[in-house]
Amino acid sequence: MVFTQTGASFAKMLFPLVGAGGATALRLTLAALVLIAVFRPWRHRLGPAQWRAVLLYGGAMGAMNLFFYAALEHIPLGIAVALEFTGPLAVALFGARKPLDFFWIVLAVSGFALLLPWAQTSGDISPLGIALALCAGACWAGYIVFGQRAGTGGGPHIAALGVGTAAIIALPFGLATAGASLFDPALLPLGLAVALCSSAIPYALDMVALPHIPARLFGILMSGQPALAALSGLVILGEVLTAGQVVGMAAIIAASIGATLTIARRVPPPEVLES
């Protein structure tokens, strides 16, 4: 999470040079080259089912990054991550059954409401940015679900294939946005830093962790993302949030932790699993 949010702050520095699409393509392409060189996925054989999962995983990753970076052009980093976090939260709330479960839904919606630009004082929170961040959240949910399927029985080489797929999806958007400036050697140091922090390192770690921990535990750990994003945005980008926005982010974080802890998992009885 620390790598991800630090990398996102660095990536926002690329926007004046190559735009959001260019920053996304640069990040994913460089990350894919690093991961493929390190983990050499061609040495591993994948069955048709796992290939489908990898392609869906990479597709969700590519769309998530494109939507998220587009959102960062319109809203602060901390707000974008809080809104994007509705995706993992939806994964946790999918099994809602008890009254307490619905309390977490109400708390999350209340937090979301505090982030909306109801008043003119919230001029830095554009409706377009909100919509893009929510689309990124939907893709993040797919990233978790398909990442678990793709990573089962795999390893970091799956992350290399997934990021490679995401880079193929993002590259046309980057070329359309930035053109030849995307290949400017002067951008390489910052682009490589963004690629390593935002993609190569965290995605490889995610792919190692996801098959070994329940989705709910992953959700609990990810609950720190909005807070770390706000801190990174403040320290690196100088983005200051209002008190109401901080309360809204805190409500979404609390709802995520509470939902992940209390919602019952749909696990079949042991005898069903054995049969």
Image (spheres, grey):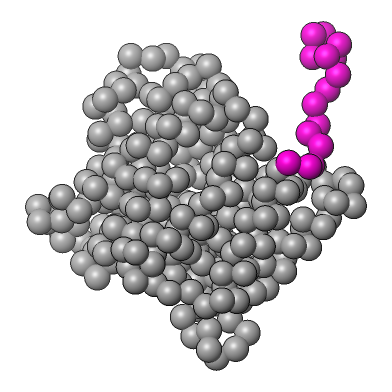
Q: Foreground: 251 or 150?
A: 251
Instruction: Judge whether 19 appears above or below 92 on screen.
Output: below
In-image side of 133 versus 14 (left or right): right
Provide residue 14's location: percent of width, then percent of height.
25, 62
Residue farthest along the right direction in this orientation = 99
Instruction: Judge whether 149 appears above or below 220 on screen.
Output: above
Instruction: Judge whether 21 appears above or below 170 on screen.
Output: below
In-image side of 188 versus 210 (left or right): left
Provide residue 230's location: percent of width, then percent of height.
46, 63
Q: Foreground: 211 or 5?
A: 5
In percent of the image, x 74 and y 62: which residue is there?
107
Q: Which span is picked out in magenta?
A: 261-275
Q: Foreground: 275 or 241?
A: 241
Residue 209 in view of the camera: yes
Provide residue 180's location: percent of width, then percent of height.
15, 59
In percent of the image, x 34 and y 71: which residue is there?
238
Provide residue 46's location: percent of width, then percent of height.
46, 17
In-image side of 159 versus 36 (left or right): right
Q: Foreground: 257 or 187?
A: 257
What is the quadrant of the C terminus in the image? top right
Asked if residue 66 is among those painted magenta in the image, a careful observer would answer no
Residue 32 placement: quadrant = top left
Residue 19 in view of the camera: no
In percent of the image, x 83 and y 14: which residue is there?
270
Residue farthest along the left direction in this orientation = 185
